Image: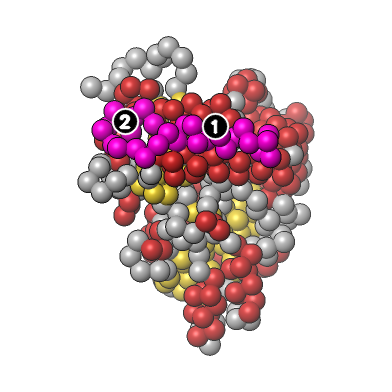
Amino acid sequence: MPKLDFHPAGRHFLQIPGPSPVPDRILRAMSYPTIDHRGPEFGALGLKVLDGIKKIFKTNQPVVIYPASGTGAWEAALCNTLSPGDTVLMYETGHFATLWKKMAENLGLKPEFLGLPGIEGWRRGVQADMIEKRLRDDMQNAIKAVCVVHNETSTGVTSDIAAVRRAIDAAKHPALLLVDTISGLASADYRHDEWGVDVTVSGSQKGLMLPPGISFNAVSEKAREVSKRATLPRAFWEWNEIIEMNKQGYWPYTPNTNLLYGLSEALDMILGEGLDNVFIRHQRLAAACRAAVTAWGLEIQCADPAVYSPVLTGVMTPEGVDADAVRKLIYEHFDMSLGTGLGKLKGRMFRIGHLGDCNDLTLMAALSGCEMGLRLAGIELKGSGVAAAMDYLTRPARL
Ligand SMILES: *Cc1c(COP(=O)(O)O)cnc(C)c1O
């Protein structure tokens, strides 16, 4: 039976890898009255968030903010830079890479989907050498863009974007580099300028700790140049008019005012803690989570320790155990939501989110819920993951 009481005792544990829990501070900031989006107060807010968000992307170039989900910002990245029939090289890291590729097809582009065979590609990061080889073979420069997902939220694998940049440069290929870090931004190290990314796509509801509803395109000089000749139809997503009006802190249409209050607060929180400290916190919690999974005797979806995600951990259930049945048990007994297995991984794994507003005790509570649920599901565990995670978090070197 679905639960009809949405306010049970205690708090719900939203441990999916986005939307992540929204801190009270942000919820309160968002409750300020909506103001005139053409008035003077708004301009100050606009300038503050447009400047602050650049620090999160590590860029000095414009960041366009859309009142849309991440999917909208995916579309904006493609339709501002490409023309009908253009070949784009996309890399299959998992379900989100697959959805972005489907969108490229729907827009009339010709995506080539590169990746390791079968499920292997969904367990490892982008293989930059495969991209380099394909680009070297493209003597006519038919490939107009390389598209990769930085943090693949369906698997818990974070790819090396700097290596992709080096691969494009080594092949001396002019293709643009488009990167989705919808779930990586503000949780995993990301450097738009240093890594030479042309368009970075992100969203509000993951590391930024905001509700869903705004999304981003960080845009390089080269991408803006190329966009002048790109002919895919675009109107709402057109960068130029937005970037022009953003100079005064305004938008061509009504922006998402209350989410921008939230963004302003989120920037204060993240920059106040310090981006590097935010990344260290995520890595530490992710390592404690993996210690738990290993102690249970279960397998981690990511098969390459060099690219473990600091954002989420994919947990494979033993052969014959439906991961969604385990999730359902955990939801019903402990009021905790975990991420489902997506695409090729449906029923084979669940995902524990440890991003955004998460600390040691949040993680320990989440792991307790998982361990109790795994026991209730009758899965034989090798040992206590909760004990292993506590052990990890209390080692003197970790405090
Ligand atoms: C969440 C997510 C998306 C989709 O974003 P929406 O806001 O749901 O449209 C795309 N890519 C990645 C990597 C994501 O984590």
Image x and y of residue 84, in percent: 45, 69
- Disc 1: which residue: 390
Whether residue 364 appears in this view of the structure is yes
Label whose residue precedes the other's in the sequence (2 or 1) = 2
Which amino acid, by three-letter code, is at mark 2?
A: Arg
Which amino acid, by three-letter code, is at mark 1?
A: Met
Image x and y of residue 88, in percent: 48, 70
User: Relative to 39, is 102 above or below?
Assistant: below
Chain part drawn in magenta: 371-399
Q: Report helix, strand or loop for mark 1.
A: helix
Q: Residue at x 38, y 63 (%)?
A: 120
Callout 2 crowding tier (Cα within 10 Å): few <14, some 14–19, many ≥20:
few
Q: Are marks 2 and 1 in contact (CB under 8 Å)?
A: no
Whether residue 255 appears in this view of the structure is no
Whether the residue under disc 1 has CB within 8 Å of ligand 1? no
Q: Quadrant of the N terminus?
A: top left
On the rendered structure, is 204 left or right of 246?
Answer: left
- Disc 2: which residue: 375
What secondary structure characterizes most of the magenta part? Answer: helix
Q: Residue furthest top?
A: 9
Q: Residue at x 49, y 44 (%)?
A: 290
The answer to which of 81 and 119 lies nearer the viewer is: 119
The answer to which of 268 and 107 lies nearer the viewer is: 268
User: Relative to 239, is 91 above or below?
Assistant: below
Q: Residue at x 29, y 28 (%)?
A: 376
